[in-house]
């Protein structure tokens, strides 16, 4: 697998001296779907903000496509490679219409108008919001807004998109909608880094990285992480079905193991 | 002593082309010490509904009374504490103490009484006294949220309304907040939580109300909820499907521990036998 993001011995401390990240090593390959989870203040947002040079290391090094974030001349290329979507889309809108808003990114990349049109078209379609193109972003529901924000990032064709708690303010239906869109984006070959509290959203990720007190405390497939770690220790709640299957397994019932979904558990219980 | 809502209808922009009926003929009442959840999708009217509880909005028709008084009466303001979404954006004090003390001071508390109130609100949410001299802006997002909630608690409202207080809080802070709210209900405070995560909060609730396009479509206990309501907890879905596959298990369950004992029971008695 080609390496996309390489983080080595990363240290980051706030101006007041508080250490936010401590000897973090993380390698993310092209096309991976990596989930980063951890309690409030565990350092996950600080970590992902290093990936497009919004924050710069106090020690160690972060590179994207072999470009080190410490060198300022690399920043334009790094930011082109890594797109970011945050929790509250409201603060990220600038356009009068959805279409204009989505076009903002590619316009800034200096692309020719026809290409911009094409990219806007593709991104809106990918997010399933083509019919909203002439609406004002502010008049949309939370889930729709978040999809516009994602379309705006998609239109710049980054190789990797970081989603920082993008569903935490959404209702269950919009959440599923946005998550499905994220999966579609990943299926098209984009590297996805997905930060969340809610592990049930992410059981089909390749990797689950758990952060606690600024360190990476687990990094494996979701099933292995659930099996090998007591995530409660890190302030993370297991998805109900995973927790239930683990209780049953620990109580000595055979053949259940760690079930990631309700259907897996059903299959194990009533084959 | 209760919040009583009779035939409440609310229209935004009445008499204009933008007129929009947001609440339709809603009647419900909330008693002392109850833990109430109000759920529904975005745009279902749940935030509009709770804005009537302390008179921020006036009904287009019908009535809302708090302990027998009209909800927009001035006296009601001290009884009903409302916390909106993203309360951390409402922090402004130089220190945590000043921020939390702002509400009760405005309601006339001074001196020792004020200090006690502030400390006990912060303590209830798991903070030490030391935090009082810190700036609220140097706290983590979760802690800022809890400090903002302490600010409302310190005014000792009889009814505490919280709009999506749990979104974005991690499991630990959620447990702290939830047990603080449960504790308040044992002291007689009514807690009203607006949330789109009803399934996660079911075990804490006394009653749940669900809104859909401005209509009250469900009102009842958690056990009624898992029998009738849409968006069931995953555990309930699992139990329902096991039942469909011929297992003799209860399907009105939403708590993991209950599911565990039900499943262990059938596995132990029958071996792993389905239909």
Image (cartoon, coloured by chain):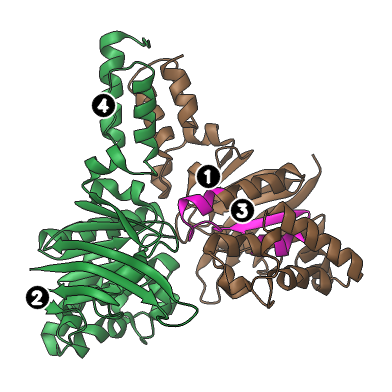
What is the secondary structure assignment of the residue under circle 2?
A: loop
Question: Which residue corresponds to mark 1?
Answer: A201
* Above or below, comparing residue A152 to residue A215 in the picture: below
Q: Compute the Cα span from label 4 to label 1.
A: 27 Å
Residue at image x 40%, y 50%?
A235
Q: Chain of mark 4?
A: B
Badge 3: how crowded within 10 Å, few (<14), some, or many (20+)? many
User: Measured from the top left, where is residue A61 in percent x and y?
Assistant: 71, 60
User: Measured from the top left, where is residue A22 in percent x and y?
Assistant: 57, 58
Question: Which residue corresponds to mark 3?
Answer: A24
Mark closest to the chain's N terminus, 2 or 4: 2
Residue A270 quadrant: top left
Question: Which residue corresponds to mark 2?
Answer: B68
Q: Compute the Cα span from label 2 to label 3.
A: 59 Å
Q: Compute the Cα span from label 3 to label 1.
A: 24 Å
Q: Compute the Cα span from label 4 to label 3.
A: 47 Å
Question: Which residue corresponds to mark 4?
Answer: B250
Q: In this view of the protein, which residue sits in the foreground, A219 or B181?
A: B181
User: Measured from the top left, where is residue A179 in percent x and y?
Assistant: 59, 49
Q: Compute the Cα span from label 2 to label 4.
A: 42 Å
Drawing shade for chain A: brown
Are discs 2 and 3 located on one and the same chain?
no
Are discs 2 and 4 located on one and the same chain?
yes
Question: Over which residues does the magenta segment extend?
Answer: A149-176
């Amino acid at each position: 697998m080609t390496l996309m993001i390489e983080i080595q011995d990363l240290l980051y401390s706030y101006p007041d001296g508080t250490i936010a990240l401590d000897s973090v090593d993380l390698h993310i390959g092209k096309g991976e779907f990596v989930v980063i989870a951890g309690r409030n203040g565990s350092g996950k947002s600080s970590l992902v903000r290093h990936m497009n040079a919004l924050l710069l290391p106090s020690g160690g090094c972060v590179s994207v496509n072999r470009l080190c974030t410490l060198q300022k001349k690399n920043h334009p290329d790094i930011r082109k490679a890594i797109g970011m979507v945050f929790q509250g889309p409201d603060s990220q809108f600038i356009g009068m219409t959805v279409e204009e808003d989505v076009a903002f990114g590619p316009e800034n990349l200096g692309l020719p108008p026809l290409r911009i049109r094409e990219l806007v078209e593709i991104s809106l379609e990918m997010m399933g919001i083509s019919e909203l193109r002439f609406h004002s972003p502010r008049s949309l529901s939370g889930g729709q807004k978040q999809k516009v924000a994602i379309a705006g990032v998609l239109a710049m064709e980054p190789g990797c998109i970081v989603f920082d708690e993008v569903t935490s303010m959404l209702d269950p239906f919009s959440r599923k909608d946005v998550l499905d869109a994220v999966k579609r984006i990943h299926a098209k070959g984009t590297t996805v880094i997905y930060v969340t509290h809610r592990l049930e959203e992410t059981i089909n990720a390749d990797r689950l990285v758990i952060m606690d007190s600024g360190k990476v405390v687990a990094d494996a497939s979701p099933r292995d992480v659930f099996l090998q770690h007591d995530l409660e220790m890190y302030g993370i709640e297991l998805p109900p079905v995973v927790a239930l299957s683990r209780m049953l397994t620990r109580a000595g019932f055979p053949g259940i193991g760690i079930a990631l979904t309700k259907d897996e558990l059903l299959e194990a219980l009533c084959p | 002593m209760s919040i009583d809502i009779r035939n409440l209808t609310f229209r935004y922009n009445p008499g204009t082309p933008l007129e929009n009926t947001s609440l339709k003929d809603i009647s419900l009442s909330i008693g002392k010490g109850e833990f109430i959840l109000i759920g529904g999708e975005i745009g279902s009217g749940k935030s509009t509904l709770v804005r009537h509880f302390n008179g921020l909005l006036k009904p287009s028709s019908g009535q809302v009374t708090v302990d027998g008084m009209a909800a927009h009466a001035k006296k009601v303001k001290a009884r009903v504490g409302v916390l909106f979404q993203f309360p951390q954006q409402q922090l402004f004090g130089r220190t945590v103490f000043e921020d939390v003390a702002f509400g009760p001071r405005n309601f006339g508390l001074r001196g020792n009484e004020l200090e006690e109130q502030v400390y006990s609100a912060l303590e209830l949410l798991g903070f030490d006294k030391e935090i009082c001299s810190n700036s609220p802006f140097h706290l983590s997002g979760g802690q800022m949220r809890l400090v903002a909630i302490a600010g409302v608690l310190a005014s000792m409202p009889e009814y505490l309304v919280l709009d999506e207080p749990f979104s974005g809080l991690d499991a630990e802070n959620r447990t702290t907040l939830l047990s603080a709210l449960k504790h308040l209900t044992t002291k007689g405070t009514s807690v009203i939580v607006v949330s789109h995560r009803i399934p996660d909060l079911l075990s804490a609730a006394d009653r749940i109300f669900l809104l859909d396009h401005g209509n009250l479509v469900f009102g009842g206990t958690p056990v009624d909820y898992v029998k009738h309501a849409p968006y069931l907890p995953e555990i309930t879905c699992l139990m329902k499907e096991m039942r469909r596959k011929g297992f003799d298990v209860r399907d009105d369950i939403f708590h993991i521990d209950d599911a565990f004992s039900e499943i262990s029971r059938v596995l132990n008695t029958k071996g792993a036998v389905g239909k």
